[in-house]
Amino acid sequence: MKKTILLLFAVMLQLSVQGQMTLQAYRDSVYAASTEVANSIIKIDQSASVVKKEYAGFLPDVSADGSFTKNFRRDGNGKLWGFSITPTLSQTIYAGGGVRASWRQAKSDYNVSREEAQSIRLDMLYEADYAYWQVSATQLYKAATDHYVDIIRSLYNVVKNRYDEGYVAKGDLLQVEARLSEAEYSQIVMQSECEKALHKFNNLGGWHEPMVVELAQSITDTIPMPQRVSYTEIIEHRPDIQAMAWRVKAAEYGVDVTRASLWPNMYVGVGGSWQTFSPNIKGHTYLDASIMLGVSVPIFHWGERKQAVASAKYDYRMAYNLWEQQRDDVEQEEADGWSALVSSYSQMQSSLRNLDIASENLSISTYSYQEGKATILEVLQAQISWIQIYTNAITARFNYAVAVSEYKHLTATD
C-alpha cells in the first residue's frame, strides 16, 4: 500500500515534469522509483511477520491427529474398519528462556530493517541531489560554451571585415578562426555531457522516456551553509549506527537462544480421543481424556552446548567491535565532510571574485582591440582566461552544492 501511494505520487510528478522541477519534488520521485526503497519496505514487513511468528511461542498450541483403518481380512466377528481422532492442547512452561530470547531477537532484527530503510532513504536523497545539481551544472557549462562561441564568432566577424579591408594580416584571421573551431568542438562535447546528465536524471526519477526538464533551483542560487553537527547528535541520528546497535542486541539475544536450546524443556498438555473399540465388534466408539506433563533434559552431548554458546558469543563480540568501529569513524567522517564544505565555500567565493575581474578584463581587451590599442593575441588571451575562470566558478558552485548535500547525508540531518 505504501509503495502504491508513492508510485501514484511519482505519476503526478511525471505529469508536471514539463514545468519547473523543484529539488524536493525530484527527491520524492527518486524515492518512489527506487527498487532499493521498495525492497527495504518489503524487508520491514517481513521482519514484522517474523516477530509475530516468534511471539506465537508464548501461546498454547492446538493440534489434532487422526487415523482411519480398513482391513481386508475379517478376524472373527470384528468390523473391517476403525478410526481414531485425538485433539491436543499443549503449553510450554519452561524452555530455558529460549522463547523470549527468540522473540526479542526478532524484534531487534525488525528495528535493524527499519534503520536500514532510513539509510537507504538518505542514500537516495543524496543521489537525487547529486543528479539534480549535475544537470544544473551541465546546463550552465553548456550556456557558457555557447556564449564563448558567440564571443569568438563576433570577434571573427570583426577581424574578417578588417582583413577584407586590408587592415589586419591573414595570420590574425587564421588564429581567430582556429580558436572558433576549438570553441565549436567544445560546444559539441558539452552538449553530449548535458544529455548524459539529463539521461541519468530521468532514469533515477523513473521516467523512461527522454524529457527536457526545467529546474526550479540552480547551483547559482544561494544555498545556506548548514550548522555543524556534534558527535553525539550524529550517533543518535545516523541510521547505520543505530542499525548496528540493534545487530549487537540481536547477537546478544542469539547467545541466549543458543544456550536455551540445550537447557531442560518442560511442557504441559491436555488431550482426548474419540475412537472405535479394538477389535471393532459392533462399531461402537468411546471418548477418552488425558493430561500430559513432558520434560526433556539434555544430559551429555559431547560439549555441544559449550561450543555452540561460545560460537554465538563470538558473533556478539564481532558485532560489538564493528559497532565501536563505526562510532570511531564518525568523528573523522564529520571532520572531513566539514572541511570539504568550508573549503568548497571558500573556493566558490574566490572564483566569483576572479570571474568579475576576468569579465572586466575581457571587455577592456575587446574594446581596446576595436580601437586599435590592443593586439589580437591580447584579446584571445583574455577570452581564454574568461572561459577558464567562468567554468571554474561553475565547478566551485557545483562542488559546494554537493558538499552541502554530502554533509547532510553523513550527519543524517536531512
Image (cartoon, rainbow, N blue to C red):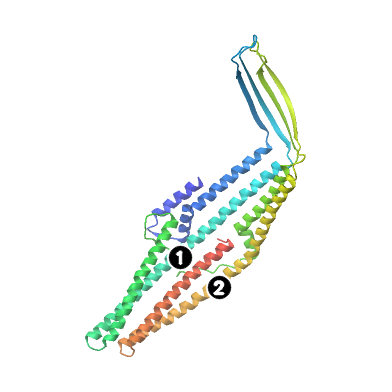
Q: Is residue 292 above or below residue 238?
A: above
In the drawing, does residue 107 fall left or right of residue 144?
Answer: right
Q: Is residue 77 above or below residue 147?
A: above
- Residue 73, image x, y percentages: 60, 13
Q: In this view, does 126 lie to the left or right of 388?
A: right
Residue type (three-letter) at the residue carrying disc 2: Val
Farthest left residue in view: 165
Q: Which mark is residue 303?
A: none
Position of residue 245 relative to residue 358, above or below, is above
10 Å crowding of disc 2: few (<14), some (14-19), many (20+): some
**Left or right side of 11 for 260:** right
Q: What residue type is labelled 1?
A: Trp
Q: Mark 1 or 2 closer to N-term?
A: 1
Give the image location of residue 304, x and y in percent.
73, 45
Q: Name the residue under label 1.
A: 133
The image shows residue 106 at horizontal and vertical percentages of 64, 46
Q: In this view, does 211 lie to the left or right of 106?
A: left
Q: Which residue has dot 2 on it?
A: 342
